[in-house]
């Protein structure tokens, strides 16, 4: 009967192995989804993906570092399927770290009907995004424009004096995206909050 | 039969056969139902191998379409949209339909035989995990005739190409990949449960043949990363159909996140496709060198180190997405670190050959070609790991050359070596020697003609995944296409060898190869349907 006992021991062993691997499987599936918020937190802390803060920040009161001059470039882009234009006359600015400046952007809905859009910012090099403070920005909220309507909106920003020395040029890209009011956006908005933009 | 090979071992070994012909279940279903309902590890292994070979030819036909279009510059045969579908489907079918199922099939057949188990631990689950595959791949292939065409975003299905700009058939692609993933996961659970619990009495972990060891580690990799793939494609599904914004910048998501998640799965995945190959080669080389494997323990540790390192290198696929310098350096060095355990393996294979009594039967030919050609693929991988250089190589044909060298003369040659090695055990006949040799030499020449010029085209700047190219690449591409046609056609010889071997040929004794020491050689050839119903008497070898 030793063989029979052996058989049972094997069965128990198989059952134990299977339940353990199933636990690992479930854990890894959850981990894959947990990576999404982890990635966002990681990027927010390190500024690695070039995203800037989604809400207004206060000015850092520090002495202007007049020994350094940083070139700040502005690039605007539209999206297919959205009849909007986003422009600025200020293609390039020379600023000192610590200095706060204002740039005016012009929105224009060239379509017939009203539509909703948002300008999503991205900073390059991404290391600079931690040192770019936005006091006012049109990118904090969605814009609704009637057909043919125009809108002028300011951006007030400051580069903090602790900007790394090797950064000489900072490029800010604003991409216009249509905002679709889908069911999922209303109810599943928590999965990927729009306010990171 | 060529006379320069050493004499085949005589039938005296047949007496050592452990299992007898066991009577099948009295009411076993016949015909199609037998295959549909089988829970026998050998039959399921055969099904997996036949499925894999079918997919190998379907994926191969797609490759032929690609190479025919690239034979000359300009657009001749297909439209760019269809070309993109071909590159995508070729990659998906070969990775998930041909290479992975082939290894699972070999594991099904050989793991129970090599550890002295009567069957896999979970035979019904085994049947289920196989039959998921034909469903998954029929669905994937059916996207070719859907409106909007098949997936066309490359086998890496980067967002937003695979979400915002994807064809409508993408949802079917996601579903079929889910099914294939579940199949791999179930297969992996089964293999782990079998290896950990069903070894012959007295067989310790460090007594297991290396094919078993590498598969155990591979199964753990599958358990760890297939759920991540499932998660990624689920996020795609939500983005496409339910308006979430995981990978959509407009809604606060990040397309680069897709690449991180994909390659967190994708890099271990490439080791899933090569570790079992290491195992096969590590059992074949000692057999035909008539020596024990050099450095058995270091082989096991090297395999485990490669598996662990595979989780730390994923971003070397993303050097040009704009990683910070620290990340570039980290992923560059961690990637180069993988060369160390891999080097240990190549060293051990060569040292096993050193002063061996080597003979060059077909399995050995493929195994030796594996060692040489896989190492070439490894070296180009080392070049690609150099982050500053990768900015030049990225997305060029140099990358295509690299991963085809590790996958075709790497994984595929190892699978073929395994098939030639174990065919006598499966069918009871030796494969036709002359035909096998023709198959080997044509394949080796074809593979190198196909993939070696790709290095030069890539270094000269030819981008991958394009249907047309600048005139200066014309000569390289013509050579590559000719090589591809040769390689593709010579695989028909492989089918001929296998069919002839099933039908007849020189009878093989239980120990079909003189140097074969593992347990599978103690059962008769062909292996009866049921083996090791009473555990075999296992005597550990001194490794």
Image (cartoon, rainbow, N blue to C red):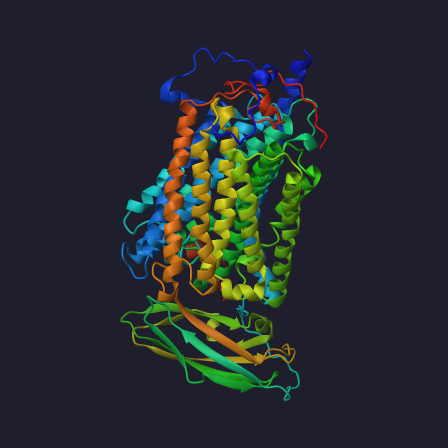
Q: Nearer the viewer, residue A71 or A81?
A: A71
Q: Quadrant of residue B487?
A: top left
Rendered position, B184 above or below B535: below
Q: Give residue B468's position: percent from left, percent from top.
A: 34, 61
Q: Quadrant of residue B47?
A: top left
Residue B294 seen: yes
Rendered position, A73 above or below B45: below
Quadrant that contains the C terminus of chain B: top right
Q: Give residue B531's position: percent from left, percent from top.
A: 55, 18
Q: Residue at x 49, y 80 (%)?
A: A73
Q: Which residue is drawn at 34% across and 68% down?
A: A82
Relative horizontal placement of residue B45, taking residue B15 as reference (left or right): left
Q: Quadrant of residue B137?
A: top left
Q: Which of B528 and A32 is in front in this view?
A: B528
Rendered position, B370 above or below B30: below
Q: Which residue is drawn at 56% across and 47% down?
A: B372
Rendered position, B532 above or below B405: above
Q: Residue at x 38, y 17 (%)?
A: B30
Relative horizontal placement of residue B164, taking residue B45 as reference (left or right): left
Q: Give residue B297's position: percent from left, percent from top.
A: 70, 38
Callout count: 0
Q: Nearer the viewer, residue B270 or A64?
A: B270
């Amino acid at each position: 009967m030793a063989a029979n006992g052996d058989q049972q021991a094997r069965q128990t062993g198989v059952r134990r192995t299977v339940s353990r691997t199933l636990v690992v499987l479930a854990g890894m599936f959850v981990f894959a989804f947990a990576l999404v918020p982890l990635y966002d937190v990681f990027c927010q802390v390190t500024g690695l993906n070039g995203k800037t803060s989604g809400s207004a920040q206060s000015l850092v009161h520090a002495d202007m570092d007049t020994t350094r001059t940083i070139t700040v470039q502005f690039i605007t882009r539209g999206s297919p399927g959205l009849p909007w234009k986003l422009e600025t006359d200020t293609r390039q600015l020379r600023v000192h770290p610590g200095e706060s400046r204002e740039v005016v952007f012009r929105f224009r809905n060239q379509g017939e009907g009203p539509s909703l859009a948002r300008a999503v910012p991205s900073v390059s090099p991404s290391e600079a995004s931690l040192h770019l403070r936005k006091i006012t920005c049109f990118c904090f909220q969605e814009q609704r424009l009637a057909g043919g309507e125009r809108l002028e909106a300011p951006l007030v920003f400051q580069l903090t004096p602790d900007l790394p020395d090797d950064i000489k040029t900072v490029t800010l890209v604003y991409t216009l995206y249509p905002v679709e009011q889908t069911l999922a956006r209303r109810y599943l908005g928590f999965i990927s909050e729009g306010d990171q933009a | 039969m060529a006379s320069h090979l050493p004499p085949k071992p005589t039938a005296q070994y047949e007496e050592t056969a452990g299992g007898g012909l066991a009577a099948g279940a009295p009411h076993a279903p016949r015909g199609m139902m037998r295959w549909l309902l089988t829970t026998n590890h050998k039959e399921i292994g055969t099904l997996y191998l036949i499925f894999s070979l079918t997919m190998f030819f379907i994926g191969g036909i797609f490759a032929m379409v690609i190479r025919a279009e690239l034979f000359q510059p300009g657009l001749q045969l297909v439209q760019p949209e269809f070309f993109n579908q071909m590159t995508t489907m070729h990659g998906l079918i070969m990775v998930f339909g041909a290479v992975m199922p082939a290894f699972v099939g070999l594991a099904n057949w050989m793991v129970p035989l090599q550890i002295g188990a009567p069957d896999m631990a979970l035979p019904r689950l085994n049947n289920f995990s196989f039959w998921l595959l034909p469903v998954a791949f029929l669905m994937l292939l059916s996207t070719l005739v859907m409106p909007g065409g098949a997936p066309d975003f490359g086998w890496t299905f980067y967002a937003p190409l695979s979400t915002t700009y994807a064809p409508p058939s993408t949802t079917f692609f996601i579903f079929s990949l889910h099914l294939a993933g579940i199949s791999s996961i179930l297969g992996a659970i089964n293999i782990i449960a079998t290896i950990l619990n069903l070894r012959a009495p007295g067989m310790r972990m460090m007594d297991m043949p290396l094919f078993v060891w590498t598969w155990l580690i591979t199964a753990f990799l599958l358990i760890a990363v297939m759920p991540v793939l499932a998660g990624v494609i689920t996020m795609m599904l939500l983005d496409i159909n339910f308006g979430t914004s995981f990978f959509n910048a407009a809604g606060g998501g990040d397309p680069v996140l897709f690449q991180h998640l994909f390659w967190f799965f994708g890099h271990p995945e490439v080791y899933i496709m090569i570790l079992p190959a290491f195992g096969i080669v590590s059992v074949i080389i000692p057999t035909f060198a008539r020596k024990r494997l050099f450095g058995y323990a270091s082989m096991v540790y090297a395999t485990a180190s490669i598996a662990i390192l595979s989780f730390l290198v994923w971003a070397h696929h993303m050097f040009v997405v704009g990683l910070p310098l620290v990340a570039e350096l980290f992923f560059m060095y961690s990637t180069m670190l993988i060369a160390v355990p891999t080097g240990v393996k190549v060293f051990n294979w060569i040292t096993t050959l050193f002063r061996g009594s080597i003979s060059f039967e077909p399995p050995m030919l493929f195994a030796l070609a594996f060692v040489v050609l896989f190492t070439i693929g490894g070296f180009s991988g080392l070049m690609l790991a150099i982050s500053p250089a990768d900015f030049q190589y990225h997305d060029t044909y140099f990358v295509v050359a690299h991963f085809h060298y590790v996958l075709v003369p790497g994984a595929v040659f190892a699978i073929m070596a395994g098939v030639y090695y174990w065919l006598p055990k499966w069918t009871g006949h030796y494969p036709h020697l002359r035909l096998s040799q023709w198959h080997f030499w044509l394949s080796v020449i074809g593979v190198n003609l196909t993939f070696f010029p790709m290095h030069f085209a890539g270094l000269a700047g030819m981008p991958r995944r394009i249907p047309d190219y600048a005139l200066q690449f014309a000569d390289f591409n013509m050579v590559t296409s000719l090589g591809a046609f040769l390689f593709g056609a010579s695989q028909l010889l492989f089918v001929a060898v296998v069919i002839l071997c099933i039908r007849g040929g020189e009878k093989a004794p239980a120990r079909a190869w003189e140097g074969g020491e593992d347990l599978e050689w103690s059962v008769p050839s062909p292996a009866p349907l049921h083996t090791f119903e009473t555990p075999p008497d296992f005597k550990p070898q001194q490794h």
